[in-house]
Amino acid sequence: MHMTDNTIFITGGASGIGRGLAEAFHKLGNTVIIAGRRKALLDEVTAANPGMQSIELDINDPASINDVAQTLIQRYPALNVLVNNAGIMPFDDAAGHIDDATMVGTLTTNFMGPVRLTSALIEHLKSQPRSVIINNTSVLAFVPLAGNAVYSATKAALHSYSLSQRFTLRDTTVTVQEIAPPWVNTDLIHKGDDPRAMPLDAFIAETMAGLATDTPEVIVEAIRPLRDNPGSQEHGLIHGFNQSLVDNPIPVS
């Protein structure tokens, strides 16, 4: 994608990867609008980055999505980049009871929200000389984490949707790029500075370099072996991956 002269809307832009991307794009001189439900956090980020703007959005609410989409189109007619970044990552137990409200919330936030928001903005994006949709999935879209089974499944779904979306937009001015983060040291689950987590600044730097190319899928080199899932032999890979985390659990306190 072109890394300058854009008007960029980023969901979940008040913290973690979303904030990191927002600040990186802002430093390049792009017009950046961040969105989220927590106005205090949005205000904190925009105050720290003069010129960055924000709008409140409940990605779980179709009415909020439609209202925000219309506001964006009216207020920022040059809008040409959508970053579907907002997400939640609750733990669950696929071998036991799955709380229905938590499951629905995860599906709605991580998958239905990006689909709804893109749908609300797609005709506007197609009217621009060049546009980009960036979907934030996860390495867990390819190698699921058993303790976050529903989350992993939502990211696999968004990856699949991105593949279809890219094909159907092939004859338009809209391109689709997917970023698939590894474990990054953010507060998505718990920011504990575990040495296995990739530092946020290093992830953002490598991801921005990837976005500056025409590659449809941006991944950091550290996770390439997991991305290159060995097809029909994936069962052993996934078992071994999850067993390693059982043997060396992620600290949560």
Image: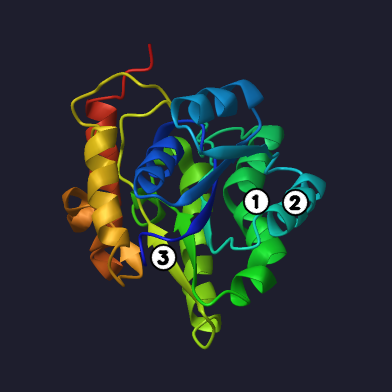
Marks 3 and 2 in Cβ contact (< 8 Å): no
Which residue occupies the extreme top position in the image? Answer: 253
Q: Quadrant of residue 24?
A: top left
Q: Name the residue under label 2.
A: 71
Q: Earlier in the sequence, mark 1 or mark 2?
A: 2
**In this rendering, position of residue 127 left or right of residue 47:** right
The answer to whether any part of residue 25 appears in the image is yes
Give whichever of 214, 155 is nearer the camera. 214
Inspect the image, locate mark 2, and give the three-letter code of the amino acid beneath it.
Thr
Inspect the image, locate mark 3, and give the three-letter code of the amino acid beneath it.
Gln
Give whichever of 60, 36 is nearer the camera. 36
**Quadrant assignment for the N terminus:** bottom left
Q: Residue 113 carries which label?
A: 1
The residue at 70%/36% (across/down) is 100
Mark nearest the camera among 1 and 3 is 3
The residue at 48%/52% (across/down) is 155
Mark nearest the camera among 1 and 2 is 2
Measured Cα–Cα span from mark 1 to mark 3: 17 Å
Which residue occupies the extreme bottom position in the image? Answer: 171
Inspect the image, locate mark 1, and give the three-letter code of the amino acid beneath it.
Gly
Mark 1 is surrounded, within 10 Å at the Cα level, by few (under 14), some (14 to 19) or many (20 or more) other residues, namely: many
| Image location (x, y in percent) of residue 227 | 26, 59
**In this rendering, position of residue 192 left or right of residue 110:** left
| Image location (x, y in percent) of residue 105 | 66, 39
Q: What count of labels does the image hold?
A: 3
The answer to whether any part of residue 236 appears in the image is no
Q: Which of marks 3 and 2 is nearer the N terminus?
A: 2
Which residue occupies the extreme right position in the image? Answer: 63
Measured Cα–Cα span from mark 3 to mark 2: 24 Å
User: What coloring was used for the rendering?
Assistant: rainbow
Q: Residue 177 carries which label?
A: 3
Q: Is residue 79 above or below residue 17?
A: below
